[in-house]
Amino acid sequence: MRGERLGEQHLYFTWEVKANDRDYHRQFKTKSFLCWKRRKYSDNTIRTAKYNILTFLPLNLYEQFHRTANLYFLFVILLQTIPEIATLPWFALLLPLACLLTIRGVRDLVDDIVSSWGWGPSKSNFTFSCCNSLHPSLWGSKADLLLLASSEPCSLCYVETADIDGETNLKFRQALSITHKELVNMDKMAAFDGVVVCEEPNSRMHKFVGTLEWKGEKYSLDSEKMLLRGCRIRNTDICYGLVIYAGFDSKIMKNCGKIKLKRTKLDLLMNKLVIIIFLILVVLSFCLAVAFGFLVVDLQTKHRYLAAFHSSSSPAREAFLTFWSFMILLSIIVPMSLYITFEFIYLVNSCFINWDLEMYYSPLDMPAKARSTSLNDQLGQIEYIFSDKTGTLTQNIMTFKKCCINGLTYGEYWNKYADGKLVFYDPSLLIAIREDEDKVVREFWRLLALCHTVMVEEKDGQLVYQAASPDEEALVTAARNFGYVFLSRTQDTITTSELGVQRTYQVLAMLDFNSVRKRMSVLLRDPEGTVRLYTKGADTVIFERLRPGCPNEHATEKALDTFAEETLRTLCLASKEVEEEVYQEWSQRYHDASVLLQNRAQGLDAVYEDMEKDLNLLGATAIEDKLQDGVPDTIHLLKKGNIKVWVLTGDKQETAVNIGFACRLLSDDMEILEEKEIYWSEHCPLSPGSLQDKLLPRAGEAQSWTKKHSLLTRMGWHYGAQQVQEDLASRRERAFVDLASKCQAVICCRVTPKQKALIVQLVKKYQQVITLAIGDGANDVNMIKTADIGVGISGQEGMQAVQCSDYALAQFAYLQRLLLVHGRWSYLRICKFLRYFFYKTFASMMVQIWFAFYSGFTAQPLYEGWFLALYNIFYTAYPVLSMGLLEQDMSAKKCLEFPEFYSVGQKDQLFNYRVFFVALAHGTAASLVNFYVALWAFDDMAGPGGICDYQSFAVTVATSALLTVIAEVSLLSLLYWDGIPELIFFHPLDANQNALTEPYILLVVLLTVVLNTMPSLAIRLLCHITKSPYRDTKVEVSTVELKAHFQRGSTRRRSSYAFSHKEGYADLISGGASLRKKPRRVIQGPSPNGDLQPAGEDPPRPRTSVLAKESP
């Protein structure tokens, strides 16, 4: 955030775009690298792939050798090329390393191809040199365009910006009046030579500043005249624009982060462990080499007749060479097979995710998809989830559920056996409407049909509404379904059909909604000549303006409380009859206020206040913003698993709060901290005693911090106009993260795609936790890339988020199974695999050190070459793979019933430094038993019938080590006992038949296995009896009630519609700019199929709706 805030001060107006002049832009160059230059103005080609033909090999090798183990293997291979210290041919280690690098390289290439398949490369026919036309049937905006003209009245263009900010309500953009009037045909469009001077390409999605210079005049430009890449054109036949930013210069691409190499926590730990093992090997090799040097000196002193053999070298040189020989000999303690097996386990566990029928969404025929095969274990360590709202938590479907009219509530299920799929059914309401005797009922539905800014058009005999929000459309549609149909409007009239009778009302004034008023009113003259005021808004503002003694006020409040408990979006309706004299006097004051040059808004608000009082209460409406199935239960389980859920949305705060209550992320017993309550200025630096002391508990007050908290913030305050010092900005960021991390829930509103990523980055920076981001639109791509795990929802906003994600799901509810089941299992399997692998390696290979004490410290290997080659890839492969692929400490059902055990992965309990050193000590102890028991057995065995040769001793030690590690893994999981006979059967008996068929040797092997396994078994039984298998798994989590308890005085959930509804089209309606006229203004130009479209004819258009998510 800090970098973007400071960067805003350096945005100069040096970006010039000239229409219809290709050569003008080609002359501008900018420095690329060293002396190379590239074109300043990008074309519209976008490639998001990480690799190409030239960069794949060097970049992938660079990424792979970031793993310390690969560097270690390469170092050992280089040592093997020195003949004086080589113990094996150099290619014996090079081939496994090449195989490992090839497997990982192919996997990375396939992942990159799959991830960039739907997102790029993409290219359209847009260039800077021409004015382009857009047909909604072909695409939305593929570049950032300046709108020049459209086929709509006054060159309006309706757009949906769900892929940019998550909002699905219809917005409008309007061209400059000069271009609307002048550019009326294709010839004038082709001759247009205007020059746009504006700011350099930047990531500010909601701001644009520039000027258009044309015919010697300058015209101001702002964001309301821009069509950004990613927006979808709705209900507009054709529009023309001038490309301002294309390709990677577009604002949506400036908000997309770079592709980052994601590595798991265990992978990073393995790098450190490899370094530790390497240092241990260096110390051991140095000690053994020093011992060899002293032995050489001793031999030369006591046996001078052997001096001739050492005449060509000194003891120091021989010790130096022996040091490197031991480094090569002991290098097998970190075998390459560990990483090859790693990749296989990751791949199969990814397939388990893909094959899980519980995460298969049959309506869309869409299974879960693990798009990355190297992050499975990290799914079991998630601590923070950052979720988008629109399309991720919700379905974007607004449904009229209930209403209260004249104190009576309608919409309750009269049948207790109803399955809940019925949207609205109440026979008593239908009877009341049809009888048309209750004046309040009639006025209630009349208000919904009249008091709005919805625009309507008729297509194929059906009415199609264009609304400023889905809520508004739901209310007008509800009135339509109950017989009060909004038919048409002009600048001064509204025509309705009321129970089959057509009526026309004269519009006297429209008192539009804004975030301060939280209400909207319309002043009408009905066909009988009576002036009436209809008002709808939040219950708090409506109740304040009711006439004294208004009937049914208490009953309506109780209905609102009931609606609020069900997390419905509510709205209050009121009206009054206005006397003619009062209206005439008010009309003059309204006109005077509307022509003020200064403080016009304040003057109009004061006039509105005088009219909107002494109202009669009609009732209240309740709208449901439908959540995806299972969202409340999923959040409930995730919170019980000690996972914190943050919602990052580009929507308004009030809408986000309502969804927070609906999905049980927020509850009424939470104390909600809003942005204005935690705002700090740059002139008042954070210090102990200010923000922390007010909002965070002190050490001595920890017991009093019992009330649950949630944080609501708008991200605009992160961008200051003044430059701040580095330490102050860092302290402010840390204070925000510290405060937010102590809250039960956090909702960030009005965030841009780049800000979403910056929030995730802040939490990762200051909390050092594993994060997951989940979203469904292009505005979530940057957040998904930044988080440790990115999950894409295959929603209605396209597949951009899925293409850039690590895992793809069809529903948010599947996240609980992905984390609590597959994530936990993967973490458990990988941790047990690592623990067992290190144990078995130390148990068998540390014997080389003990053997060195009896071989004169000469780095002579104890084992045969075939055993070293087959030990990891054959003899012990079966139990390792069984544990890595099939290990389950509890079933999937139990994982979901007891999500508290998920915290095992968050606390790194199953594999950490302590577990590693325990495995090291355990393996070392086993190696001591294996070697010295065999050594004791072979003592004084010389003779005709004795077995005392070196090879027999090596086979005995190797067999003891092999059976010991197999027995040990059987103790970890009894599922693997059936693997022992197979492994014994495949043991190469022909290596030394005398040793393995001798009963004495077999008894020695049995004794070794018993001595190694009995202490381990006793310790495990003792731990199982005395303590839980997972320590410290109990976590303090707040229970998310499935039934919210509404508190009096809380208005957040009641009238969320009035809070979330945005300013409508009242100005456009009053001015007549938005009204469609016949014949419609259509610029002569190409039709969607490429043919010329004659002026005056309507080009064919598919049917669209405001709530549609895909392109028409």
Image (spheres, rainbow, N blue to C red):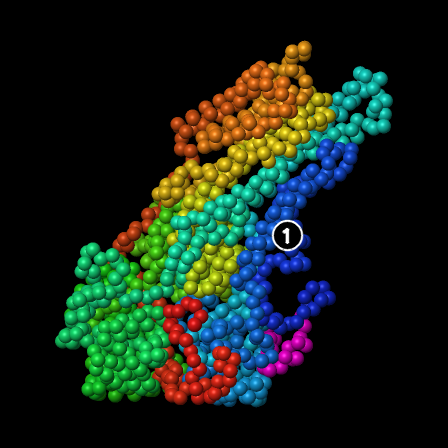
Question: What residue sits 47% from the left and 80% below the top?
Answer: 238
Q: Residue at x 21, y 80 (%)?
A: 500
Q: Quadrant of the C terminus?
A: bottom left
Q: Quadrant of residue 1000?
A: top right
**Vertically, is 952 above or below 132?**
above
Q: Residue at x 57, y 74 (%)?
A: 125
The segment highlighted magenta reads 10-30
Secondary element at image label 1 = helix
Residue 946, how many percent across, how many down? 65, 12
Between 438 and 190, the one nearer to me in the picture:
190
Q: Nearer the viewer, residue 488 or 1111?
A: 1111
Q: Is residue 260 toward the left or the right of residue 1065 in the image?
A: right
In the rendered image, residue 24 lying in the magenta stretch gets the answer yes
Residue 313 is a magenta residue: no
Q: Position of residue 380 (x, y in %)?
A: 46, 45
Q: Is residue 741 above or below residue 413?
A: above
Residue 372 in sight here:
yes
Q: Residue at x 83, y 19 (%)?
A: 306
**Quarter occupied by residue 924:** top right
Please give the residue where the numbered disc 1 appears in the rendered image: 60
At label 1, the amino acid type is: Asn
Q: Left of 391 or right of it: where is 500? A: left
- When the figure is inspected, residue 105 is found, relative to residue 577, above or below; the finding is above
The answer to whether 989 is drawn above or below residue 19 in the figure is: above
The spot of residue 1025 in percent (x, y) is: 39, 27
Residue 370 image position (x, y, % from top left): 49, 51
Looking at the image, residue 1038 sits to the left or right of residue 1095; the answer is: left
